[in-house]
Image (cartoon, coloured by chain):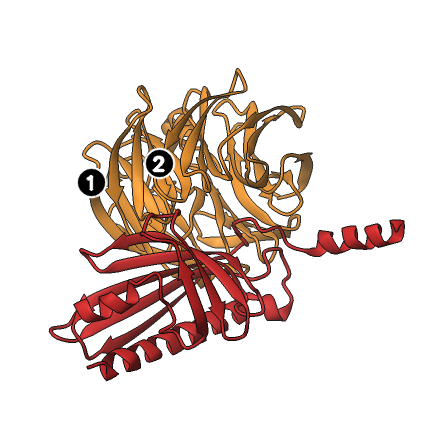
Chain colours: A red, B orange
Amino acid sequence: MVRRFAFLAALLALVPLPVSAHGPSRQKVIEIIEINAPADKVWAVVSNYKDMTWHPDIAKSEAMDGYEPEKTKRTLTFKTGGVVTDKVMAYTPETKYFSFMTDEVDLKTMPVSGYSSYFTLTDMGGKTKVEWKGAFYRGYVNNDPPPELSDAAAIAAVTAYQKRGLEALKAKIEAAP
Amino acid sequence: MLTVATGLFWYGACSAVLSGSAKTRTATGVREAFVTSQLADALSIIDLASMKSVAEVKISGRPAGIAVAPGGKHAYVTSPESKELIIIDTARRAIVRRLQVGRGPLGIAYSPKDNRVWIADWYDHKILVRDGDTGETLGEVAVGKSPSGVAVTPDGRYVLSADRDSNSVSIIDASTLKVTGTVTAGGHPFGITIDDTGTRAYTANVTSNDVSVIDIAAQKLTSTVQVGSRPYGVALAQDRAFVTNQAAGTVSVIDLASLGVIATIPVGSYPEGIAASTDQRFVYVACWDDNTLQRIDAKTLEVTATASTAEGPRAFGQFLQ
C-alpha cells in the first residue's frame, strides 16, 4: 500500500501542472486562404462557436451559449478521440474578427499549450480572404522538452492543423449552394 | 527588470557625465530601444529619433529578458532556452560575454548603484545575482514559484520579484540577500515595475487581468486595478501607469492618484514589453505578433510612431537607453 502510494506520488510529480502554460518562447503560425464566397457567408461558418466540425479533424463540437470573452467555453472531440477545451477570447462581428484560446489540450491530439486562434476575414469584393493565426506554446512547458513536445513539433502540428482546416472550410463553403 | 523609475533616477544622477559623450541624445533622454526579438533569435536595436532599426545582434537561445540602463555600457539579455546571461557592449553592439545561468533565466534587472544584475530563474525559483561586468556569481536568493519579472528600487536597497506561480511578490534586501517580505498579488503576476521614489510597485497579473499596487515599505497590497485581457508589463510616466494587455491588443492607462483606468489605447497585436522614456514624454511598446515597436505619446495617449523589429519582439524588462 505504502509502495503503491509512493509510486503514485512519483507519477503525479511527472505530470505537468495544468497552469496557463508559459514556456520560454511563444510561437506563431499564420495560414491564409482565399474563399470564393462573400465575407458574410464565410463569417457565418467561422464564427459559429457551437460548431467547428467544418474542421476535418473534429468529430464533435459542444459549446455554451453566447460569446462572452473568457467565459463562454467549448469542448471539441477529435476524431482521434482526444479532447480539447477552449474559450472565447474576442468576438467582433463588425470587423469579422474572432478569437478563442485552449484551456485543456490532449497532448497526443495536439502537442501544444495555451493555443490561441485568431480569425480575420477580409472582403475581397465577392471573395473572402481568411487569415487563421495561431499563437501557442509547445506541449512541454518545462525546459528541455522531449522531441514530440518540442517547439518544432508544436509548429508542425499547428501548421498542418490550420492548413487542413482552411482547405476544408473553403471546400465546404464553395460547395454550398 | 530594471524599472523605468530606476532608469529615471540613474539618468538624473549621471546626466552630467553623459553630456560630454560623443553620442547625441534625443530630447527624450533615451536614444535607443534594445528589443529582444525572441523568434528571430536576435536583439533589434531601434533608433528612437527615427524609429528605425539600426542594428541587429544575433543571440541564440530565444532571448526574452532585457535590462539596460540609460547611459550604461552594457545591455543584459536572458536566453531561457539556452539558459544564458548574455552581456552586450551597447556602443559596439557586440556580445562580450555569454554565461550559463540556472535552468530558466527570464526576467532581469540591473542595479547601477552597485553594478549587479538580478536574474529570475523561472524553473529553479530563485533570483540569481551576477556581477555587471564579469557576470560572475555573487549570490542567489530563493523566492516564490516561477519568478518572472524583477525590479530594483532606485536606491538599490530592495529587489522585487513577481513570483508568477505563487501569485505573490518577494521583497529582497539587496545587501543581505534575504527575503524580508512576501506580498500577495493577483493571479500570475508577470511584469513588475517600481516608481521613481521607490514607494510603490506595480505588477501585471496575467490570469486575473488586473494590476496589483504594492506599498514596498509596508510590504502590503494596497489596491487592485482591473485592466484588459492578459496583462504583461507596466511602465510609468506622467503620473500614469501604462499596462500592456496581450490578448486584447491594448494598453490600459491608469491614473496613479485615483487608480482609475482613464484610457484604453489600441496598439499592435500581442503587446508585451513596455517602457517609458526618461523624460516621461513617450512610452514604447513591443508588439510580439506584429513585429513592431510602437511609440505612445504619454500625454495625448496616441500612438505616434511604429518601428519594425525582427520576429517576435518581447522586450521583457527595461529596454531603453
In the figure, B106 relative to B167: above or below? Answer: below
In the drawing, what numbered circle is on residue B227? 2
Q: Are marks 1 and 2 in contact (CB under 8 Å)?
A: no
Crowd tier of the residue under label 1, counting other residues whose Cα lies within 10 Å: few below 14, some 14–19, many 20 or above: some
In the image, B34 versus A15, the foreground residue is A15
Residue A109 percent location from the top left of the image: 54, 70
Amino acid type assigned to the residue bearing label 1 in the image? Glu
Left or right relative to B178: residue A101: left
Q: In the picture, residue A58 is in which quadrant?
A: bottom left
State the image coordinates of residue B168 (x, y, percent, origin top left).
Answer: 56, 32
**Residue at (46% x, 42% y) in the render:** B207
Secondary structure found at label 1: loop
Residue at mark 1: B302
Q: Is residue A24 above or below residue A109?
A: above
The residue positioned 68% from the left and 40% from the top of the image is: B137
Asked if A111 appears above or below B65 in the picture, the reply is below
Q: Nearer the viewer, mark 1 or mark 2?
A: 2
Cα separation, mark 1 vs mark 2, equals 18 Å
Identity of the amino acid at label 2?
Answer: Val
Q: Position of residue B226 (x, y in %)?
A: 37, 33
**Label 2: chain letter:** B
Q: Is residue A107 left or right of residue A114?
A: right
Asked whether residue B24 is in view, the answer is no
Q: Is residue B22 left or right of residue B88?
A: left
